[in-house]
Image (tube, rainbow, N blue to C red):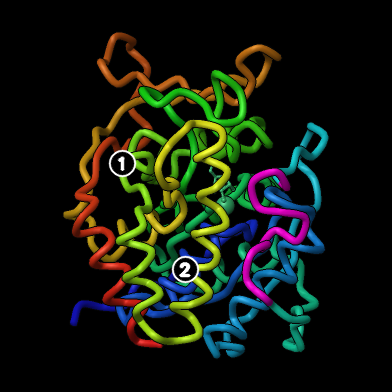
Amino acid sequence: MPKRQRVIIDTDPGHDDAVAILLALACEELEVLGLTAVAGNVPLHLTEKNARIICELAERTDVPVFAGCEKPMKRALVTAEEVHGKSGLDGPELWEPSMELQKTHAVDFIIETIAASPENSVVLCPIGPLTNIATAFERKPEIISRIQEIVLMGGAYFQVGNVTPAAEFNIYVDPDAAQIVFRSGAPITVLPLDVTHKVMTTPRRLRAFRDLGSRVGHVVAELTGFYERFDLNKYGMEGAPLHDPCTIAYLVRPELFSGRHINVEIETESELTRGMTVADWWGVTSRKPNANFIGDADAVRFYSFITEKLAIY
Ligand code: RIB
Ligand code: CA
């Protein structure tokens, strides 16, 4: 087996975050160095708590959980309880976690881990607003050149926005952080709505999770079942896009995805288009390509991959 990828997952659980974390912890191809929580879907005190619940559900309390930034770099926090419920993980019966939250701040953990690791040996996998990542880059720019890759869920181009007509939630919440990350020079792969909207849940796919017969399988079916009702009401979509697990699937099975290396800039000024990822898909500008922007995925093999991996629990 090729060398395991060492990954920090920066997260705002969140239903799809939960599935992504459970998937990552089930992949022997990945070594999850830690979970760094950020304010996003719900406030920080809930995202860090939910991250600990997910580690307990996976019976992986060896994975350290760190709390990070409780608000965006410049903007007021915008949350998404209408999608994820007040707790951030509404739907299944969950519990108060007993595993410890680490005392180290998430930003310090990111900086210290990258600084102490050999070059190109840490992958950052942000699946929420980019506040923690950008804060680490501002505080310690010398870590940027040491990062193996950033594989993030965020942005949209052909699929346009899900929180405004122009912007996807993770980028909208902290556009200034996103601008810092996209201009950092770090190697970036982006899993935008363009691809996540091609991997929709269906009753048959949810049944496959439930049929795993494990507590994890049951909770994943409950979480995705709760989460898809929002998209049904909002978009009239049968099913929900499984956003965040796309990053983990890309890390382990990149051949399931396709995209282009293009320039992506972030709108930070205009209130009308704040958080828009201006993706030069057709190369009509002279702006330097800075991101591998994924546009397509093999949905059937994506769900088979997730179901196979979750069967480990
Ligand atoms: O727009 C989808 C993204 O916003 C996902 O990461 C979801 O968890 C929310 O954070
Ligand atoms: Ca998320």
Give the residue drawn at x 68%, y 62%.
90
Residue corresponding to mark 1: 198
Choose top left, top right, bottom left or bottom right for residue 167: top right
Give the residue drawn at x 35%, y 81%.
212
On the rendered image, what quadrant is the C terminus found in? Answer: bottom left
Residue 264 position (above or below residue 64): above
Left or right for 47, reference 209: right
Residue 278 position (above or below residue 178): above
On the rendered image, what quadrant is the N terminus found in? Answer: bottom left
Relative image position of residue 217 (x, y in whole percent): 44, 78
Relative image position of residue 230 (x, y in whole percent): 57, 43
Q: Main secondary structure of the magenta part?
A: loop
Q: In the image, is residue 94 part of the stretch drawn in magenta?
A: no
Residue 20 visible in the picture: yes
Q: CA distance from mark 1 to mark 2?
A: 19 Å
Circle 2 crowding by C-alpha within 10 Å: few under 14, some 14–19, many from 20: many
Instruction: Name the N-terminal-most of marks 1 and 2.
Output: 1
Choose top left, top right, bottom left or bottom right for residue 173: top right
* Residue type, numbered disc 1: Lys
Residue 292 visible in the picture: no
Residue corresponding to mark 2: 221
Choose top left, top right, bottom left or bottom right for residue 282: top left
Callout 1 secondary element: loop
Relative image position of residue 37 (x, y in whole percent): 68, 62
Residue sitting nearer the eye, 30 or 299: 299
Magenta part of the chain: 81-93
Residue 141 position (above or below residue 101): above
Residue sitting nearer the eye, 26 or 199: 199
Left or right for 280, reference 260: right
User: How many numbered marks appear?
Assistant: 2
